[in-house]
Image: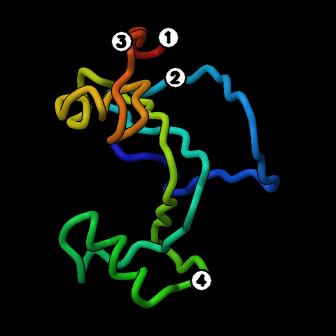
């Protein structure tokens, strides 16, 4: 299974204080999220010259590319509300700070409130 797009959606506006509320649905084995309070944007290095995800992000920080080259993914640095198929995606097995409703890699959800895939 492959995603249909390799892009992020951004608002044109900048917001200071806000309340975010939304419904979401994830596909079987899916992994997505909503990033907010974005601090930086980086074009990832080609996988052919890097091994881990950290390398993909850190290498371009040393030599910035400002435009979006074809077939390269952008990484945004900020907080992420995780939207995940906890049961089927490998991140769901890495522990609660990587599961749905987590502040990704920082703070776990208070409870698992996910519904079955497709709902």
Which residue sits at x=68%, y=29%?
20
Looking at the image, is mark 3 or mark 1 earlier in the sequence?
A: 3
Position of 54 compared to 81: left or right?
A: left
Coloring applied to the structure: rainbow
In this view, the residue in front, 9 or 98, is: 98
Looking at the image, is mark 2 or mark 4 earlier in the sequence?
A: 2
Alpha carbon of mark 4 to alpha carbon of mark 1: how far? 39 Å
Residue to which mark 1 is pinned? 119
Which residue sits at x=65%, y=51%?
9
Secondary structure type for disc 4:
loop
Secondary structure type for disc 3:
loop
Q: Is residue 14 above or below residue 17?
A: below
Secondary structure type for disc 2:
loop
Disc nearest the viewer among 2 and 4:
4
- Asked whether the residues under the numbered discs 4 and 1 touch, taking CB atoms below 8 Å apart as contact, a structural biologist would say no
Where residue 22 appears, as percent x and y from the top left, is 65, 23
Alpha carbon of mark 2 to alpha carbon of mark 3: how far? 15 Å
Which residue sits at x=27%, y=66%?
54
Where residue 33 appears, as percent x and y from the top left, is 49, 38
Quick one: label 2, few (<14), some, or many (20+) residues within 10 Å? some
Residue to which mark 3 is pinned? 112
Alpha carbon of mark 4 to alpha carbon of mark 3: how far? 39 Å
- Asked whether the residues under the numbered discs 4 and 3 touch, taking CB atoms below 8 Å apart as contact, a structural biologist would say no
Where residue 11 appears, as percent x and y from the top left, is 75, 51
Position of 47 compared to 11: left or right?
A: left
Quick one: label 1, few (<14), some, or many (20+) residues within 10 Å? few
């Amino acid at each position: 299974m492959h995603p249909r797009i390799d892009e992020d959606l951004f608002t044109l506006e900048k917001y200071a204080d806000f309340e975010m509320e939304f419904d979401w649905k994830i596909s079987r084995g899916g992994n997505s999220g909503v990033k907010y309070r974005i601090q930086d944007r980086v074009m990832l290095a080609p996988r052919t010259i890097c091994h881990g995800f950290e390398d993909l992000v850190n290498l371009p920080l040393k030599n910035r590319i400002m435009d979006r080259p074809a077939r390269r993914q952008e990484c945004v640095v900020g907080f992420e509300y995780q939207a995940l198929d906890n049961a089927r995606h490998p991140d769901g097995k890495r522990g609660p700070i990587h599961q749905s409703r987590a502040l990704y890699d920082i703070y776990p959800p208070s409870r698992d409130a996910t519904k079955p895939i497709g709902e």
